[in-house]
Image (cartoon, rainbow, N blue to C red):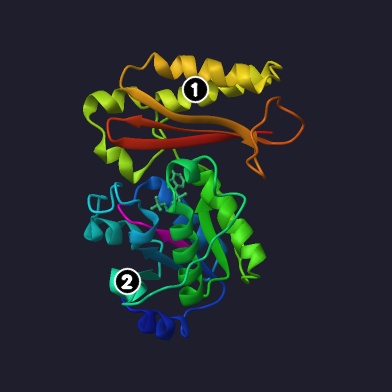
């Protein structure tokens, strides 16, 4: 497995990697959720590139960029069996002095995560475009865990005619339902005990929907009630929206619905979602 730290080095290496190339962008501190994407990329491609880059431009000024968990040696050991190349640029390599170009996807970025994290998706679309240009992959792998990010990347790729296929991969969970996330490491033992309430609320929504409940507001209220029983949880948003446009539903229709939420435990902000279809 080659570890490459410069754009020039990645370009040089890319001339020798076998096609098709599967690419998995990550911010590191890897867990089985990330590894499931990398394994899928390995199954479907002749070579696999993984990037590890904690992208400063997608964090707000009061967010956890400085404290975001990092463990390069552990990450590299986890990737060794599945990845051919790891691209690990520094901040200045990606954003040199006077860097001044941004990619913005309108329409899908003002709500949900975009509403509570202004500028987040601008940072994500910009870094992902840069990574796509540097790595030149055939297929790219993203987790359904970040459902809005996945929609934004698909839209951006289509709108900008970026020549690759975006593959959506299912959310990996802990045995108690908590979606795996690098940020779970921030949780105190007490908060960790309460954190499965996100998946419990999503399961409640699925249950109501499968029994024929069509009133989206009623389901949101029931989810809200369930989460409020967990004293350490603070709801940021609960949404039941069109899974393609992210417009909030008042009633569940024949179209697929994205049920999603952000919930804070202390300073730690957790997100999760399911799709009803
Ligand atoms: P991150 O390192 O958080 O930027 O995530 C890198 C990629 O891994 C993104 O496409 C995420 O959606 C995906 N991912 C994160 N957590 C999970 C999970 N629990 N299951 C599946 N994919 C995940």
Residue 130 spot, x, y in % from top left: 46, 71
Residue 55 location (% of width, % of height): 36, 60
- Rate crowding at label 1 as few (under 14), some (14 to 19) or many (20 or more) other CA atoms within 10 Å: many
Residue 183 placement: quadrant: top left
Q: Residue at x 50, y 70 (%)?
A: 132
Q: Eyeballing the image, is 240 above or below 205?
A: below
- The vertical placement of 152 against 192, above or below, is below
Pointer 1 or 2: first along the chain: 2
Say whether residue 227 is visible: yes
Q: Secondary structure at mark 2?
A: loop
Tell me the tag on residue 235.
Answer: none
Residue occupied by mark 1: 201
Image position, residue 35 (x, y; %) = 41, 52
Q: Left or right: 144 with respect to 127?
A: right
Q: CA distance from mark 1 to mark 2?
A: 38 Å
Q: Quadrant of residue 185?
A: top left
| Residue nearer the viewer, 98 or 151 | 98
**Bounds of the magenta segment:** 24-29
Q: Is residue 176 visible?
A: no
Is residue 157 on the magenta stretch? Answer: no
Whether label 1 touches label 2, CB < 8 Å = no
Residue beneath the point at 55% across and 76% down:
19
Residue displayed at 43% across by 83% down: 11
Q: Work out whether residue 210 or residue 247 is closer to the camera in this orientation and state it.
A: 247
Return the residue at label 2. 89
Question: What residue sits 53% from the left and 23% below the top?
Answer: 203
């Amino acid at each position: 497995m080659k570890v490459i730290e410069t754009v020039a080095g990645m370009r040089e290496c890319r001339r020798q990697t076998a096609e098709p190339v599967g690419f998995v962008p990550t911010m590191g501190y890897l867990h089985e959720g990330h590894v499931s994407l990398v394994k899928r990329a390995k199954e479907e491609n002749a070579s696999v590139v993984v990037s590890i880059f904690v992208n400063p431009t997608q964090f707000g000024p009061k967010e956890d960029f400085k404290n975001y968990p990092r463990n390069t040696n552990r990450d590299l050991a986890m990737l060794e069996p599945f990845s051919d190349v790891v691209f690990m640029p520094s901040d200045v390599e990606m954003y040199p002095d006077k860097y001044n170009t941004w990619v913005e996807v309108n329409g899908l970025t003002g709500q949900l995560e975009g509403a509570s994290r202004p500028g987040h998706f601008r940072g994500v679309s910009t870094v992902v475009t840069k990574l796509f240009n540097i790595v030149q992959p055939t297929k790219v792998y993203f987790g359904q865990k970040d459902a809005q990010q996945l929609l934004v990347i698909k839209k951006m790729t289509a709108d900008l005619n970026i020549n690759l296929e975006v593959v959506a991969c299912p959310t990996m969970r802990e045995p108690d339902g908590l979606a795996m996330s690098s940020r779970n490491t921030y949780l105190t033992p007490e908060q960790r005990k309460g954190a499965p309430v996100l998946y419990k609320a999503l399961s409640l929504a699925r249950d109501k929907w499968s029994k024929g409940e069509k009133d989206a507001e009623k389901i949101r209220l029931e989810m809200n009630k369930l989460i409020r029983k967990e004293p350490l949880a603070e709801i940021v948003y609960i949404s039941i929206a069109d899974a393609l446009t992210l417009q909030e539903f008042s009633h569940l229709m024949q179209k697929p619905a994205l049920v999603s939420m952000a919930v804070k435990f202390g300073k730690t902000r957790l997100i999760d979602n399911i799709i009803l279809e």
